[in-house]
Image (cartoon, helix red, strand yellow):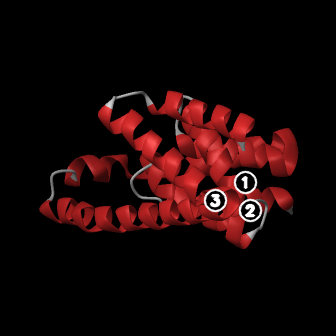
């Protein structure tokens, strides 16, 4: 039964997460934290930060880690397969239709309507992570890490992986 739950937890976000891995992160979080309660919001946000520091698609990293955490090696295999299965099925079945209608104005309009929804979902998730951080380590640590991350990434153009690694080290030693 646990493998079926792992499959559902990553197959549904794979189907509904239009826009790739980042768009499916809030959906995965809803399944893992809200529906199945395999992790807390804090654990999910820490795991997401670590997964963002590693190379590769975020959805498969989440599926592999969470699948392994919940169901061992077979759980990781099921999770990764479930994360890529919707795209794989759609590519196999709908490739001809996609090439036929890729320049359609209706398809382009659909994309314009979906992008704001993805932005809102990511914003809500970021707000929840910020609030959880505030509750966990306090306002000053949260403001410091947020401000330092902004300056390092946006102003000094430091790669986000180094910023995440630095925040992990800072948290490990000082928090």
Question: Up-down: is 44 above or below 60?
Answer: below
From mark 1 to mark 3, how far is it between C-alphas?
17 Å
The circle drawn on residue 43 is: 1
- What residue lies at 39% left-to-right and 43% top-to-bottom? 150
The image shows residue 32 at horizontal and vertical percentages of: 70, 62
Q: Between residue 34 and residue 172, name the one nearer to us.
A: 172
Identify the image quadrant of residue 44: bottom right
> Is there any visible trace of residue 149 in the rendered image?
yes
Which element is circle 3 on? loop
The image shows residue 110 at horizontal and vertical percentages of: 25, 66
> Is there any visible trace of residue 87 in the rendered image?
no
Residues marked 3 and 2 touching at CB (< 8 Å): no
Which element is circle 2 on? loop
- What residue lies at 30% left-to-right and 34% top-to-bottom? 155
Picture quarter with the N terminus: bottom right
Residues marked 1 and 3 touching at CB (< 8 Å): no
The image shows residue 136 at horizontal and vertical percentages of: 69, 59
From mark 1 to mark 2, how far is it between C-alphas?
5 Å
Identify the image quadrant of residue 118: bottom left
Direction from residue 171 to residue 158 in the image, left or right = left
Residues marked 1 and 2 touching at CB (< 8 Å): yes
Q: Which residue is mark 2?
A: 40
- What residue lies at 86% left-to-right and 43% top-to-bottom? 72
Number of residues whose C-alpha sits closer than 10 Å to that of mark 1, classed few (under 14), some (14–19) or many (20 or more)? few
Q: Which residue is mark 3?
A: 138
Picture quarter with the C terminus: top right
Q: Nearer the viewer, mark 3 or mark 2?
A: 3
């Amino acid at each position: 039964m646990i493998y079926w739950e792992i499959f559902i937890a990553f197959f549904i976000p794979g189907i509904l997460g239009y826009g790739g891995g980042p768009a499916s992160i809030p959906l995965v979080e809803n399944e893992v934290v809200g529906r199945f309660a395999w992790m807390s919001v804090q654990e999910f946000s820490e795991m997401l930060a670590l997964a963002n520091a590693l190379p590769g698609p975020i959805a498969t990293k989440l599926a592999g880690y969470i699948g392994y955490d919940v169901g061992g090696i077979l759980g990781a295999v099921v999770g990764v397969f479930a994360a890529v299965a919707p795209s794989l099925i759609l590519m196999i079945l709908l490739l001809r239709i996609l090439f036929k209608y890729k320049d359609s104005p209706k398809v382009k309009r659909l994309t314009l309507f979906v992008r704001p929804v993805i932005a809102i979902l990511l914003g809500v998730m970021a707000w929840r992570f910020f609030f959880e951080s505030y509750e966990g380590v306090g306002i000053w640590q949260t403001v410091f890490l947020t401000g330092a991350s902004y300056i390092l990434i946006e102003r000094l153009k430091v790669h986000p992986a180094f910023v995440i690694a630095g925040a992990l080290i800072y948290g490990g030693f000082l928090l």
